[in-house]
Image (spheres, rainbow, N blue to C red):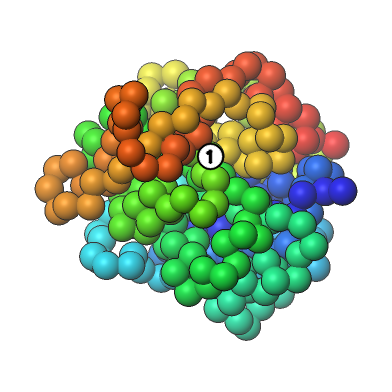
């Protein structure tokens, strides 16, 4: 039986790769795509999600609008300089088909999926954790129906939006603190420490481009993201952060994890959004399963294979 899956997302170029990866993987049954602010505002992330679900031909999957801002503190940072002002590398207007919008709030769609599922549901949180944190707060009675959270976020050795913080966590540190420090649902965290090592080279992108309509569309979306990565890092590659996390949701154990209690810095100083592990033998708090290693060539090959015809 496929594992029921909710994707909570903020598309986003690498989110686009991840969403289509999940929708093309028979090991999971995507029951909903819920959307928040993040890489760009929700006025872009929501139609982007609908367009990507339509691109996959999956009009049966509900898409719902969630958080338009963080739980507590407003934030100014977005990532339009990386993902394009429209979130999809300037290509959003080329995707004209839209999957239907579920009129219910995202958290109520998530709760309905959990109530209706006959087996535990995986929640892949690949954007800010706001929707998932509100789900836990508003519906604590449903925690036992979540098999695990798979989170793309965090960094143990330096961030990508500040010196300390990874972007998704920095978007809403209070929400991620809620997620990572609760003991009711297991959490697998896929941080920058691994996803940056999983950067896909130019040949990988060209493989997508030659791999059928979906792969070719994704290659077009990736093009400007690829140029930004080359400018920042001096190499022809793209970091497919969210797709690496989604592959773990699809194929549990494909990433090798280390259990560590994690706290998120929620102050307003320069460490805001830092994910801080406690490696002491007597560390208190529930362990987060932090993905720090994998067979990286195999991971990238698996992602490309699933996205090409």
SS type, badge 1: strand
Residue 307 point in image, percent of width and height:
75, 38
Q: Residue furthest left?
A: 269
Residue 69 point in image, percent of width and height:
35, 68
Image quadrant of residue 158?
Answer: top left
Residue 205 lies left or right of residue 207; in this view the side is: left
Residue 268 point in image, percent of width and height:
15, 53
Image quadrant of residue 244?
Answer: top right
Specify whether residue 253 is in view: yes
Question: Residue at image x 73%, y 27%?
Answer: 302
Question: Residue at image x 53%, y 39%?
Answer: 188
Circle 1: is it few (<14), some (14-19), or many (20+) Cα within 10 Å? many
Asked if 21 appears above or below 76 in the picture, the reply is above
User: Which sits in the foreground, 263 or 90?
Assistant: 263
Specify whether residue 16 is in view: no
User: Which sits in the foreground, 222 or 298?
Assistant: 298
User: Which sits in the foreground, 137 or 99?
Assistant: 137
Residue 114 lies left or right of residue 129; in this view the side is: right
Residue 153 point in image, percent of width and height:
43, 42
Asked if 172 appears above or below 162 in the picture, the reply is below
Q: Badge 1 is on which residue?
A: 188
Question: Residue at image x 53%, y 27%?
Answer: 257
User: Which sits in the foreground, 123 or 115?
Assistant: 115
């Amino acid at each position: 039986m496929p594992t029921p899956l909710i994707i909570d997302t903020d598309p986003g170029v690498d989110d686009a790769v991840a969403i289509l990866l999940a929708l093309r993987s028979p090991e999971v049954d995507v029951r909903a795509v819920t959307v928040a602010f993040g890489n760009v505002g929700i006025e872009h992330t929501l139609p982007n999600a609908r367009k990507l679900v339509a691109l996959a031909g999956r009009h049966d999957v509900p898409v719902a609008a969630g958080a338009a801002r963080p739980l507590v503190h407003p934030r100014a940072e977005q990532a339009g300089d990386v993902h394009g002002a429209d979130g999809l590398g300037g290509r959003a207007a080329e995707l004209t088909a839209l999957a239907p919008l579920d009129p219910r709030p995202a958290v109520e769609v998530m709760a309905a999926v959990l109530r209706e599922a006959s087996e535990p549901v995986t929640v892949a949180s690949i954007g800010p954790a706001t929707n998932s944190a509100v789900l836990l707060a508003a519906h604590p009675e449903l925690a036992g129906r979540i098999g695990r959270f798979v989170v793309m976020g965090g960094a143990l050795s330096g961030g990508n939006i500040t010196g300390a913080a990874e972007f998704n966590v920095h978007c809403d540190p209070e929400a991620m603190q809620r997620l990572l420090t609760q003991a009711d649902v297991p959490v697998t965290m896929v941080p920058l420490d691994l996803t940056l090592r999983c950067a896909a080279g130019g040949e990988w992108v060209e493989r997508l481009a030659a791999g059928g309509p979906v792969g070719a569309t994704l290659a077009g979306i990736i093009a400007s993201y690829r140029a930004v990565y080359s400018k920042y890092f001096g190499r022809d590659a793209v970091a497919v952060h969210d797709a690496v996390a989604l592959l773990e949701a699809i194929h549990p154990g494909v990433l090798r994890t280390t259990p560590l209690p994690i706290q998120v810095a929620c102050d307003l100083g320069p460490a805001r959004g830092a994910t801080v592990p406690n490696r002491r033998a007597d560390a208190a708090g529930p362990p987060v399963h932090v993905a720090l290693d994998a067979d990286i060539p195999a991971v990238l090959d698996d992602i490309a294979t699933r996205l090409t015809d």
